[in-house]
Amino acid sequence: MANIDDLNDDLQKQSVSAQVELWELELSSGNFAYFYSGLDSDLGEVQFRPRAGGTPINTYEAMPIQGEGFSLQSDGPSARPKLTVANILTTFSDALGGLQNKDLLGKKIYRRRTLEKYLYDNDTSDPAVEMPVQMYFIDRIAEESILQVQFELASPFDLAGIKLPKRVILGNSCSWKYQGAAPEVAAADKQGACSWSQKGIINIGGTNRNVYFNKDDEPLISNSTGVTAHSGGTITENQIYSTNADTSRIQKVNADGTLSAAGTLKDYWQARGTYTSPGTLSSTNPRVRQVRLYTGFSAGQTFNAYTDPRYNEYALSDDKVYRVKDKTVSGSPAPSAGNSGWIKGDQCSKSLRACNSRYCARWTTAGGGGKPDVTKISDKEIPFGGFPGLSA
């Protein structure tokens, strides 16, 4: 399956497949007209997946249309692009339901760009492979004649009554809603720009992997991964080791809220390299990083909670990781966003380190099982370059 990295590679080549500009005009809520300016070799219809992915596949009709003035700039007034359409009322009368030019004022229009090779059926990737989608409002009719009509477009924050900033930038902290624009979220419900999958799905080496981290940026790893008890001696890069946790100040929180002895708890560590004398494995030892293990949910299983919530147990359900909230949980129902006994286990520290851990993840099977590698991709860009005012 192709992805945005493939598109970026194509755009750097000397010979680039024909670029296609697709337009989606929202006539009413959920009702769209789809059109494009045609291909050099063909003026027939083309198809492309919806912006949110999945089906049904959108069909775009060719018609004489030209957009201009879409340049981005960091200062001065925002761009107000022009969209020129030839004889729109007769060419698209059926699709527009008899609307006149003035009826289109205030309507949303989406500009989508891709290469011909990524159109459906040439490429069936889901989500579709394309450049960032741009949304505008039709603000006014700049020119109208019997031959053409030219609309002036305005960006969402360049309209009367809209004030900036719409979100506050905080130093050293990301203000996007974690997974607010995830592929699993419907287009109408997307919030912000964090596109990290709700199921932690990332394509690593041509294969989709599920990568999870908690709010402390500790990797969440399946308990089926090989774990070696460590009491001293050599550690090997990427392997997982266990040590006994200090439970002198930890108690188990039972299902009824009462407390009891914690019993034996384990800390888990992933070796950052191979060392013959690594020292004591701990959160302050730079030779290891702490990880947490999750278990596949079973209705007959008990998941424990403790007075130190870092040791509350994790469970995987529907490819999402959840953590016991504040009391031990037994039986069903399965963990979910609506189950009060659980909270999301896969959370974000709202730091640049969190973005880097996810989007630049590598994968390893060293030591048994699959898990995020301790080394990350060094030459891969984080979406949006991270976020303003942030340090690593």
Image (spheres, rainbow, N blue to C red):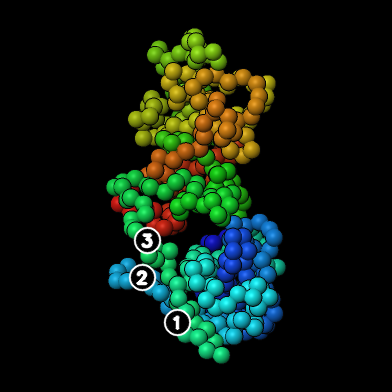
229 or 233: nearer the eye?
A: 229
**Amino acid beneath label 3:** Gly
| Residue drawn where x is 48% and y is 51% of the image | 191
Give the CA distance from mark 1 to mark 3: 22 Å
Residue 331: percent from left, percent from top? 65, 21
Q: Secondary structure at mark 2?
A: loop
148 or 101: nearer the eye?
A: 101
Q: Are marks 1 and 3 in contact (CB under 8 Å)?
A: no
Residue 284: percent from left, percent from top? 34, 30
**Amino acid beneath label 2:** Ser
Circle nearer the N terminus (1, 3): 1
Tag on residue 161? 3
Q: Is residue 341 above or below residue 320?
A: above
Q: Quadrant of residue 148?
A: bottom right
Residue 71: percent from left, percent from top? 40, 74
Q: Are marks 2 and 1 in contact (CB under 8 Å)?
A: no
Give the CA distance from mark 2 to mark 1: 17 Å
Give the CA distance from mark 3 to mark 2: 16 Å
**Amino acid beneath label 1:** Ala
Circle nearer the N terminus (3, 2): 2
Circle nearer the N terminus (2, 1): 2
Tag on residue 142? 1
Judging by the rendered image, the residue that carries numbered circle 2 is 78
Q: Is residue 128 above or below residue 87?
A: above
Q: Which of labels 3 and 2 is toward the front? A: 3
| Residue drawn where x is 70% and y is 80% of the image | 44
